[in-house]
Amino acid sequence: MSELIERTYAEAAKGINGDWFLNANTNWYEYIVNLPLNQKIAYLIIVLNNQVSNGGFHQYFVNGYGQFALETIKALLEIGAEQRAQLLAVAYNTVNKDHLTQDIFRTLLLEKSIKSLFVTDELYEPLNDLDIQYYTIDNEDIENLLGIFLERQ
């Protein structure tokens, strides 16, 4: 199953241009949301899981992946990872506390203009609390759920 996940993720990521990470533009976002469903879901879930596992929700947002938060919530629900979807929704609403539109939020995130995320450390503790909850979910094996989803595609 992990081979299918790795292959699907690699297929999704192969078209990403490294320059997209350097500029606050919509190319990266547009590329990912327009992937075939299986590739999009694999990319979004693997990125979330890797980012949160390696540095938490704070890292996920700081590294720009938070621009995909709403799509990732849908992807998590699609594979049956409701608890992780709920945690990501709380993290998104914590970072986007002003309830900005998705486009404005994405722009500010990529421009590193969200002060509570990039300047102060006020989001560190609430996001860290969510990290701990994410790590302790024991009834949602993300790899298994994603693998089952991909096998059905």
Image (cartoon, rainbow, N blue to C red):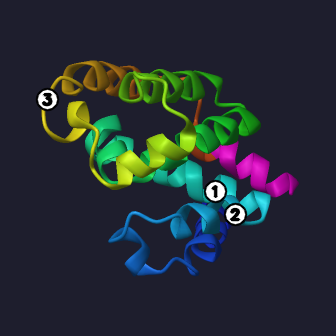
Magenta highlight range: 144-153
58 lies left or right of 119: right
Can you give x and y, in whole percent of width and height, for residue 129 in the image?
Answer: 29, 18
Can you give x and y, in whole percent of width and height, for residue 46 in the image?
Answer: 52, 53
Q: Which mark is residue 39?
A: 2
Q: Amino acid at mark 3?
A: Asp
Nearer the observer, 86 or 29? 29
Residue shown at the point (32%, 71%) measured from the top left: 22
The residue that label 3 is drawn on is 121
Q: Residues within 10 Å of mark 1 (few under 14, many from 20)?
A: many
Mark 1 touches mark 2? (CB < 8 Å): yes
Figure quadrant of the C terminus: bottom right
Secondary structure found at label 1: helix
- Decide whether residue 152 is among the magenta residues: yes
Q: Amino acid at mark 1?
A: Ala
Figure quadrant of the N terminus: bottom right
Observer able to see residue 79: yes
Q: Residue furthest left?
A: 120
The residue that label 1 is drawn on is 42
Q: Amino acid at mark 2?
A: Gln
